[in-house]
Image (spheres, helix red, strand yellow):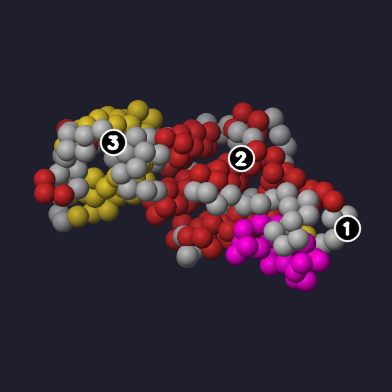
Amino acid sequence: MNPEADFNTPAILLRRVEYGDNDLILSVITPDRGKLALMAKAAKRSRRRFGGVLDLFALLELSCRTGRCGRMPLLAEANLCEPFHTIRAEVAKTAYASYWAELVHFWGDEGQPQPALYALLRDVLTALDRNQLPARVLSLLFQLRFMHLAGLGPRLSVCVGCRRAVETLGDVRLGFDPSRGGVVCGCCEAAPPLPISRGALKELAWIADGDLVRAQRMRFSAEALGAGEELMEAFVSFHLGREARSLKFLRHLRESGVLS
């Protein structure tokens, strides 16, 4: 791939920031170029080129011009492929999509091909928009796969301390330690940070090892979903080095009863 050439690419819009009076700086994820920052000149006043297209989470086909002297590429044209209208129309869906987009924005590698990450985000957004799976299940699936693609997938089947398989630990208490990256048994750590049952661990392992099609055939307990949310959000935040702003909003919605 010639980095100096103009290019076309499918993309998902992760973030948009106003720049000056009329311009926008966009963060997008693409399959072949990874995460990109683009300058959309006069985007706030050009209805002909960009009107109603540059919405968050939208699936787009972009035409870009390479920036001069190392500057960011310029967005020449954007065609809307999938708007995901229902995501932006429902606050709960917007909250989950914002969390996923923020993780990709801060963790995605600039300019490096990431077809698997692009496909993962596209697929969970599609499923969320079409109500194919509950948002909580999709969020667990996204976080588990996202961390796996980052080379940091949590270890759910063995204790990270003694290396014994969870299924051989009998009645020993189990928990999850984000800093150690996996399950820890009560023999290795007297008070694991995040207690979790064997049943919930088993369901999380099903999500981690399956795909969207398999997940649609499964029923997940409220215990597994609640424990999984706490476990994965703590794990992701630990590796991100901070708590995502969108995660704070998600937790606010849960506490206020908007998310069940």
Q: In this view of the protein, which residue sits in the foreground, 90 or 177?
A: 177
Spatial CA distance of label 1 from label 3 is 55 Å
Residue identifier under label 3: 53
The CA span between labels 2 and 1 is: 32 Å
Q: Any mark on residue 134, and which?
A: 2
Q: Residues within 10 Å of mark 2 (few under 14, many from 20)?
A: few
194 is within the stretch colored magenta: yes
Q: Quadrant of residue 253?
A: bottom right
- Image quarter of residue 46: top left
Q: Secondary structure at mark 3?
A: loop
Judge whether residue 31 is colored magenta.
Answer: no
Q: Mark 2 belongs to which amino acid?
A: Pro
Q: Quadrant of the N terminus?
A: top left
> Magenta stretch?
176-197
Of callouts 1 and 3, the N-terminal one = 3
Which residue position holds label 1? 171
**Residue 154 falls left or right of residue 171:** left
